[in-house]
Image (cartoon, helix red, strand yellow):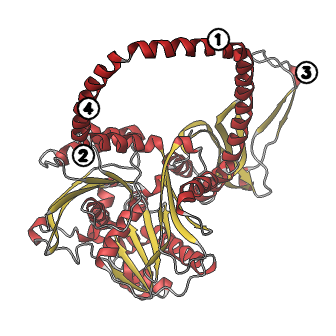
Amino acid sequence: MAVKTGFGIDIGEDSIKLVELRKEKTGIHLSRVKTLKTGITPSLTRTEKEGIIEDRLNEILRDVSVGKAPLTVATPGLSAFIRYVKLPPVAPSRLQQIVGYEAQQQVPFPLEEVIWDYQILESSGKSETNIILVAIKAEVISNLMNVMGLQGIEPSFIEHRPLAFYNCFRLNEKTEGEVKVIVDAGARATDLSIEREGNLCWTRSIRIGGGDITGAIQKAFHISFEDAEKLKKDKGIIYLSEDEEKSAGEEDRRLWQAMRPVVEEMVAELQRSASYFHSQLEGGRIDQILLAGGCSRLRNFDLFIADQLGTEVKKLNPLKDIIYSPELLQGEELELELGVAIGLALRSVGEAFSTIDLLPKVVVGRRELRKKRVYLTLSGLSMAFMLGVSWVFSLQNYNVLKLQMQNISTELEEYEKYDGEIQKLKIGQSRMQGRVNILKDLVAARDYWPNILLEFSRILPDNTFLKNISSVGQDKGLIELKGRTSNFDAVTNLISSLEQSPLFCSVKVISATPVEETAGGALRAKVVEEAAGRPRGRRIRREEVRVEEKHIPIAEVKKTGIDFVLRVELMK
């Protein structure tokens, strides 16, 4: 058996991890591990974050010679859409066509703007075909390819991040008739997959991670993000009972109170996923939860999940069945954070469960063409020889061919009189195609706005509500949000969540005005109504306005709030 080497690169906001695996007769060997913290904080813009990732990737690859070895990179879990679809029995020759139709129904973007792939799953019976469908905006893949291209590297595969982590799970854990939840708690998001009787049946990415816990500590202690991260790692602990909390020191209790809302929200999302599995997927009792990722290192996090969900929780070691020297980890506890990188490298050496590949088809075609270059060269030489022989025979038959061409020219003159009718038919065909394209666009957009509204409901902070959602002018890609929230921090958190969403590009603040509410619900304000039809830019005359001014005693003021107007650009 020839030794096969492969690389995996996990590009995260918190850190970049590179691993090299070797597939030998004795098993899978870990040859190299390199990790590098990015130093990215939530306050940075998207452009600034991309610049930092480029610099860190260049630094981590500076001493690593990938060469021609296969390399797999992952997409962020939150940037892709993943669906599990049940299809009726269908002939293999028609499967691609049926899946393409399902992709049009499931993906909330036109298929021309996305890269998608699917994988057939094992099925217990022959009555249906189960598939995983994964789609991602082509722009996300293009940006990833550009970042890798700056380092002179072209990925062999582009894997969906939760599936890469599942590759690692399949190598290290054996299941027999059990239901297991595999959780990767990272910095930006938490990915989970559910396996039943050895078959993957559901995957989800939750928009909460260790970075949110750090942000809560930063806000509570009024310190920098870096100091909050260090405080979380050094002293962060989850108390399992009130007695434990009361016996702790004042600073430790304060730290837990800052982390608690985020931790409880993460566990609540896990509980919702388990409930969905029971109710919608007709799943049985969950036997075990396997936990990994940087956030899983938070003390008592596994015990807290077990206590809240009533299920056994065990930390997953991504290196359990991999042969390696402890010196590679440089004395750091990195095992729990290497799951995705290991899963990517397993794909590179041909030992992965997933076959989903989000690499653009044009890149795959170009690579296949390079592989066949030698064969094409030999074929070209053979063709040149054959052409030389053919030329000799063609010269001998020149007169015969010339006579045949004259006969063909005569027949073409007979058909030219139909040219006008053919042109009319082509014009009619073009008009009909335009109508068909309009109908296709309507079908592709039918799920667009429901997904936009669902995204708003997911990311809207507490004590925040929207009064109005409207399009801006004739621009379908620009909407205006009017709403109210409790304070300016909530407005900032809403803007950050909107900018991180895969459905929105940018957010512009039109206004954010403090208002005061009285006990009766009235506002301390002046009300001015302009007469309808006033030309834009002309001053308001006194007879065109009605002014009502209400003075409310200070003792009646109950609370303050923020009225905001945001202009949001939709992802196209």
- State the residue position of label 4: 380
Indicate the quadrant where residue 563 lies. top right
- State the residue position of label 2: 57
Which one is nearer the viewer's eye here, 12 or 231?
Answer: 12
Residues at marks 3 and 1, CA–CA distance in whole angstroms? 81 Å
The number of numbered discs placed on residues in the rendered structure image is: 4
- State the residue position of label 3: 543
Can residue 27 be seen here? The reply is yes
Q: Earlier in the sequence, mark 3 or mark 4?
A: 4
Query: For the N terminus, which image quadrant?
Result: bottom left
Going 37% across and 75% down the picture, which residue do you hit?
Answer: 291
Q: Amino acid at mark 4?
A: Gly
Q: Amino acid at mark 1?
A: Glu
- Left-right relation of 452 to 69: right
Q: Amino acid at mark 3?
A: Glu
- State the residue position of label 1: 413
**Residue 80 coordinates in the image, percent (x, y):** 48, 54
Closest to the camera, between mark 2 and mark 1, is 1
**Residue 84 coordinates in the image, percent (x, y):** 55, 66
